[in-house]
Image (spheres, rainbow, N blue to C red):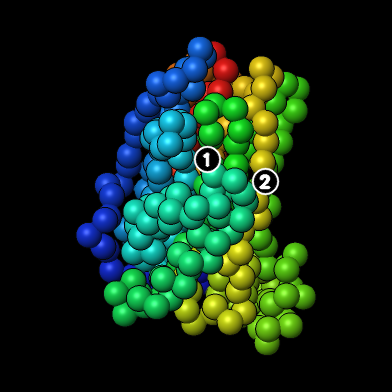
Amino acid sequence: MDRFCCFRGSSSQFAGSSSDAGKGRSSQGRTKVTYGFNLVKGKTNHPMEDYHVAKFTNMRGQELGLFAIFDGHLGNIVPAYLQKHLFTNILKEEQFWTNPDVAIANAYEKTDKAILSHTPDLGRGGSTAVTAILINGRKLWVANIGDSRAVLAKGQQVLQLTIDHDPSTERGSIENKGGFVSNMPGDVPRVNGQLAVSRAFGDKSLKSHLRSDPDIRCENVTGETELLILASDGIWKVMSNEEAVNIARRFKDPQAAARQLTTEALNRDSKDDISCIVVRLRA
C-alpha cells in the first residue's frame, strides 16, 4: 500500500530489519495450530514499513492466537506503534469476552485517536491493518482497514475474509466529507490524489476524508478449515487469493509456505514491501 508523496518518515525505535522470518505453534488442543511468517523489504529506497504480530498467549484460561500485518506509509512509526499497542487495546476491552466484534471496533477507534493525538511523536504517516484472533483454535475473528488481506482455505472454498478499502468503492463517503478521488491515467485511485486506500490508521492531514472503522468477520474453525493467510498488498498486487492458497498448500511447514509466497511475489516483480503470515489450522 502506497501514498504518493516525496516525504518518507524517519525510522523509529521499533524499526525492524529488512527481512524477518519465524514460526511457532499453539500449546493446547489435540491438533496443534502452527504458524510461520516472512517479511521482505521492497525495492523502494525507504526503510521497511511493514510490521507483524504472530504469537499465542493465554488469558482467563483461554488460548488466543494473535496475528496481524501492519503496512505503513510515510514512514514506519505508525505500524510500529500498532504492533505494540493494538492487540493490547483490544484485549483491554471487557466486552472482548462477550462481544468480540464490539471490542475490536472500539479498540480500533481508540487506537486511531491515540495515534492522532500523538502526531508530533508519531509523524504524519499512517498504516493499514489486518488482524486475526484465534480463540481456543475454534473461532476466528478477523478485522481490517485498508488493503492488507486475510484469506481462508476451508474445504474446497477459498474465502477472502476482508474487504479491500479502495477509494473508488468508497467514493461517496469520501466526497460527502469534502474530499475527492483522483483517477489519473496509469495510476490507481487515490484520496485527494495521495492515498491509495480509503481507510487507515493515522494520516492526520487526510483524516477528515478517511475512515478508520474496521470491517469485522467471524468464522468457525471446523475440521475442513485448513489454513489462513494474512498478507500485505505486496503479495495481493501480483497474485490472486486462489494462487496464494495453492502455493501455501504445497508446504506442511507454514514458515516455508510464507517464505515461498514472498519469493513468488518478488519473482513476479512486486516492488512494495512484502509481508506474509501463514497459519495452518489442520495437520
Q: Determine whether, in the image, residue 187 is placed left or right of residue 251.
A: right
In this view, which residue lies farthest toward the left? 13
Q: Name the residue under label 1.
A: 133
Q: Residue at x 54, y 26 (%)?
A: 137
Q: Quadrant of residue 76?
A: bottom left
Q: In this view, does 35 lie above or below 53?
A: above
Whether pointer 1 and pointer 2 mark residues with C-beta atoms closer than 8 Å, the reply is no
Q: Quadrant of the C terminus?
A: top right
In this view, which residue lies farthest toward the bottom? 178
Q: Determine whether, in the image, residue 103 is placed left or right of residue 162.
A: left
Pick whichever of labels 1 and 2 is earlier in the sequence. Answer: 1
Q: Residue 217 carries which label?
A: 2
- At label 1, which amino acid type do we have? Ile
Foreground of the two, 199 or 218: 218
Neighbour tally class for label 1: few under 14, some 14-19, many 20 plus, Cα within 10 Å: many
- Mark 1–mark 2 Cα distance, whole angstroms, equals 11 Å
Which percent across, then down, holds residue 171? 74, 73
Q: Determine whether, in the image, residue 8 is placed left or right of residue 178.
A: left
Foreground of the two, 23 or 62: 62
Foreground of the two, 53 or 75: 53
Q: In this view, does 165 lie above or below 262?
A: below
Q: Which residue is drawn at 69% across and 26% down?
A: 154
Which percent across, then down, holds residue 207? 54, 78
What element does badge 1 sit on?
Answer: strand
- At label 2, which amino acid type do we have? Arg
Neighbour tally class for label 2: few under 14, some 14-19, many 20 plus, Cα within 10 Å: some
Which percent across, then down, holds residue 101? 62, 51
Which percent across, then down, holds residue 20? 32, 39
Q: Which mark is residue 209?
A: none
Q: Residue at x 45, y 49 (%)?
A: 91
